Image (tube, rainbow, N blue to C red):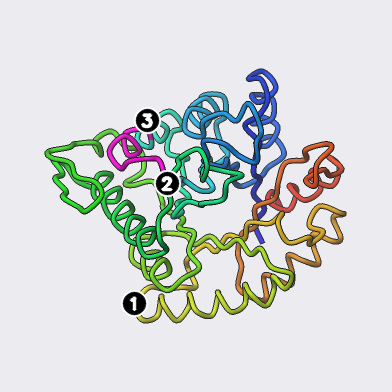
Amino acid sequence: MTPHVVLWPIHDWPEMADTWRRAEELGFAGAWIYDHLAWRGHTPWDDAYTSLAAAAAITSRIRLGTLVTSANFRTPVPTAAAARTIDRISGGRLTLGIGAGGSAPTSDGDVLDREWTPRERADRFEEWVTQLDALLTGESVSVAGEYWSARGVTVSPGLVQRRPPFWIAAGGPRGMRLAARLGQGWVVGPETDQPEDEVRRMVERMAETCAAAGRDFASMPRLLLTGFTGEPWLASAAAYDDLAGRYSEIGITDVALHWPRPGTEWDADPAVVEAIAARARG
């Protein structure tokens, strides 16, 4: 199990810069940031892509990414341009976690003042990912969709990576088919009182979806986002090892943990975080 860390874009930059550097120094495989306009009423909540560009300039090894980029408020063309820029600044260390976006009033729901049906959200997400893939792989790209269109756009030249990998968050059939078609990784984030059972079922469905699409599921990274189920991932190194072992048996390859945030449910002993990060190095 490969450990990653989710950072909080809520502190002044000198402190945030130190946190990004510390995450790299500890040896985490990746450092991720949520992509929201607002999150649970917290102010300030800094922009994800701007934060990643700054982090790319002061780190040199750790992979950087969004967990996940939201199709709620980002349109494909400027998103592709921002991704190319971060990929170039970072020397090819960007991973794009991508999701359909949430509707909860504690994140972007009230800010956007717009609701989509599940069908509309799935339609928008598929069109968004398909267009982003085209923009980051082709030249003079023209796309005409129901939600977004563009003509003669050239973004991909200058990318360090052939195309930053897409790690797609998907729990339903359409999202899984999209992940099997265009994703290099898959993200799952259970929020139930029986997360292992849920993840087991989702892994089985994703494996079946990849098989139907002719994808090699075994070679696809499978990232578990933790922190919303009550499981004691950061209680101790032993607790982490126990949970990591159980989820590895289910089929999860990578795990995203939250950077300790004192006074919240994500508080943790920094020594435990350091011990867990050491697993990435060894």
Which residue is pictured at 40% across the width and 55% down the height?
A: 116
Q: Sequence-wise, which precedes: disc 1 or disc 2?
A: 2
Of 166 and 108, the residue lying toward us: 108
As measured in the structure, the alpha-carbon distance from the residue carrying label 1 to the one carrying label 3 is: 32 Å
Tag 3: amino acid: Thr
x, y percent for residue 206: 48, 74
| Residue 17 located left or right of residue 70 | right
x, y percent for residue 64: 53, 40
Residue 85: numbered disc: 3
Give the main secondary structure, helix, strand or loop, of the magenta stretch: helix
Residue 114: numbered disc: 2
Which residue is pictured at 54% across the width and 47% down the height?
A: 67
Q: Secondary structure at mark 3?
A: helix
| Residue 70 located left or right of residue 278 | left
Tag 2: amino acid: Arg
Assess disc 2: are there few (<14), some (14-19) or many (≥20) residues with their C-alpha within 10 Å of its C-alpha. Answer: few
Name the residue beneath numbered marker 1.
Answer: 214
| Residue 122 located left or right of residue 152 | right
Magenta stretch? 73-82
Observer-side mark, 1 or 2, equals 2
Assess disc 1: are there few (<14), some (14-19) or many (≥20) residues with their C-alpha within 10 Å of its C-alpha. Answer: few
Observer-side mark, 3 or 2, equals 2
